[in-house]
Amino acid sequence: MATPAHSLLALSLVLGTMGTGSLAACGNDDQKESKTLANEAVAAAGQGRLTEAEELLEKATATYRDNHNAWYNLGFVREQMKEYEGAAEAYSEAARVKDSDAMYHYKLGKAYWNSNNISQAQSALERAVQLNPRLYGAQYHLGQVYEKQGKPKEAATAWSASATLAPTFGRPFIELGNLYIKWDKLDPAVSVLDQGRLNVRDGEDLTEIYYSLGMAYTKQGNWDKAIEAYSNAIQTRSSNLDALRQRGFAYAEKQDVENAKKDLKSFVDQGGGGDAFHIQAANQRLFRLTAAQ
């Protein structure tokens, strides 16, 4: 997903600032030792030795509990290891020490989300947005939380904010467009997805945008536009079998039997993404098309 992320370079830069901050100013031996351990952890993480990095950062935070940079980076390393509950514990400590840092709360909210702690994710992400309303990744994930909680209007507001703040970030366009389709608000869905189509460059997000745009046109019965959108989805990512299937159905609705059979047969022959329900639906439509000839 194309959300804001901190690479190991960013990890290193965060720790690199500690020498001129409170740690150096204080001169306390525990704080200096904590800094040394944390810098060793950066070197280990940079070489892919995540378990070693985690152990060093645990020592760093045990040596000096208020080293919020070390806590933050411990959360980062645990995220890479997919230890989301542990990551949330670390980010929580970072936010405890420095409550004013929106990024700490944002990363905490993501970790809670990934560990399926939805209520805590909401609290952390709302705090992140309160501190920095322009943090578009936090707005996007907050929309996910609201949608999961059955609050579609709040989700739409958050996704709209994310899309406005970062027009090249595809996920909020996809989620908002699909939400409008679910509501049968098809004109707003087309408008949102069309805006995303013009701005987003990431191939995975763009193929989803075109697919969702095709679905909106399909629900409108605009078969030419639907076929165009599905074709763009396939051109962007040839592996988009959902778009191939739906284009076949759209051709069938237009009575373009040959193109419909071609797409649906190709969908089935490629395994239909392993989806037995959609494979059966495609085969049934193929049978009807063949029988009608």
Image (tube, rainbow, N blue to C red):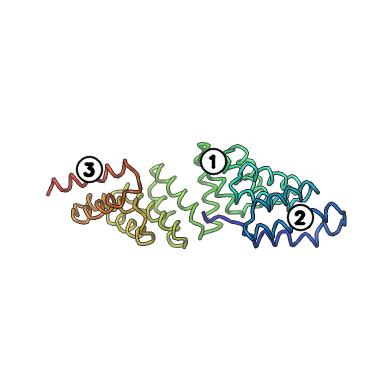
* The quadrant where residue 232 appears: bottom left
**Circle 3 Cα neighbour tier, 10 Å, few/some/many (<14 / 14–19 / ≥20):** few
Question: Residue 250 — which label?
Answer: none
Please state the horizontal and vertical placement of residue 129, each as a whole percent of the image: 63, 49
Q: Specify whether residue 156 is in view.
A: yes
Q: Which residue is mark 1?
A: 146
**Circle 2 Cα neighbour tier, 10 Å, few/some/many (<14 / 14–19 / ≥20):** many
Q: Which residue is mark 2?
A: 37
Q: CA distance from mark 3 to mark 1?
A: 38 Å
Q: Earlier in the sequence, mark 3 or mark 1?
A: 1
Front residue (pair 278, 186): 278
Q: Is there CB contact under 8 Å for labels 3 and 1?
A: no
Q: Amino acid at mark 3?
A: Gln
Q: Amino acid at mark 2?
A: Leu
Q: Earlier in the sequence, mark 2 or mark 3?
A: 2
Residue at horizontal 69%, vertical 58%? 42
Please state the horizontal and vertical placement of residue 235, each as a whole percent of the image: 35, 62
Q: Specify whether residue 102 is in view.
A: no
Please state the horizontal and vertical placement of residue 131, each as a whole percent of the image: 68, 50
Quick check: 105 above or below 23? above
Q: Is residue 155 left or right of residue 252?
A: right
Q: Which residue is mark 3?
A: 284
* The quadrant where residue 39 appears: bottom right
Q: CA distance from mark 2 to mark 1?
A: 39 Å
Q: Is there CB contact under 8 Å for labels 2 and 3?
A: no
* The quadrant where residue 228 appears: bottom left
